[in-house]
Structures are given as structure tokens and as C-alpha cells.
Image (cartoon, rainbow, N blue to C red):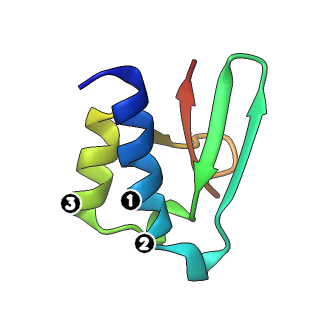
Amino acid sequence: MNEYQRMARAMEIFNKYTNSGTTIHAEHDELYAGPHPDLVSESDKAELNELGWHPDPYNGMTFYMFT
């Protein structure tokens, strides 16, 4: 899976939770997106982790990945 496919798949997962206040923004070399991690199923969290997305350790309100 290439970088574009990984990004597209992550956005597909985030899109399942659009009623929960999703967001997307970038800061320096990090991209933040998605709903609150507590709202995401464990299987989706596992797949997001494989795609390089992790719950934001600073505010815990979304997911992040390094670019």
C-alpha cells in the first residue's frame, strides 16, 4: 500500500465517525485528523495504528501522524 492509499484508508475510517466532530489540521511535521479516540472502535484503532495514525498524547482529542 503506498502513501496515498494509506492516507485514503485512514480518511475512510475517520469518515465513519463524522457525527462526532471530526477535524483535520497540520502543525510542523504532524498531521492531526479524526474524531476523539474514545469514539473509535478497537479494530479501527488497530488499523489506524498500522497506517501510522495514533491517538494524540497531548490533548487526546484526535489522532496524529508524522509526515
Q: What residue type is labelled 2?
A: Lys
Could you give the CA–CA distance between mark 2 and mark 1, rounded to whole angstroms?
A: 5 Å
Q: Do the residues labelled 2 and 1 touch (CB within 8 Å)?
A: yes
Residues packed near mark 1 inside 10 Å, few (<14), some (14 to 19) or many (20 plus): some
Name the mark on residue 25. Answer: none
Residues packed near mark 3 inside 10 Å, few (<14), some (14 to 19) or many (20 plus): few
| Residue picked out by circle 2 | 16
SS at mark 3 in the image: helix
Q: Which amino acid does label 1 sit on?
A: Ile
Name the mark on residue 43. Answer: 3
SS at mark 1 in the image: helix
Q: Do the residues labelled 1 and 3 touch (CB within 8 Å)?
A: no
In the drawing, does residue 4 fall left or right of residue 34?
left
SS at mark 2 in the image: loop
Q: Can residue 32 be seen in this view?
A: yes
Quadrant that contains the C terminus: top right
In the drawing, does residue 11 fall left or right of residue 6?
right
Q: Residue 55: percent from the left, percent from the top?
A: 49, 46
Q: Is residue 38 above or below residue 14?
A: below
In the drawing, does residue 22 fall left or right of residue 5?
right
Q: Residue 64: percent from the left, percent from the top?
A: 56, 38
- What residue is at 47 percent from the left and 60 percent from the top? 14
Mark 1 vs 3, N-terminal side: 1
Q: Quadrant of residue 26?
A: top right
Q: In this view, does 55 lie above or below 4?
A: below
Q: Is residue 52 visible?
A: no
Q: Quadrant of residue 5?
A: top left
Task: Decide which of 40, 8 is in the foreground and name it.
Answer: 8
Q: Residue 54: percent from the left, percent from the top?
A: 45, 39
Q: Is residue 32 above or below residue 34?
A: above
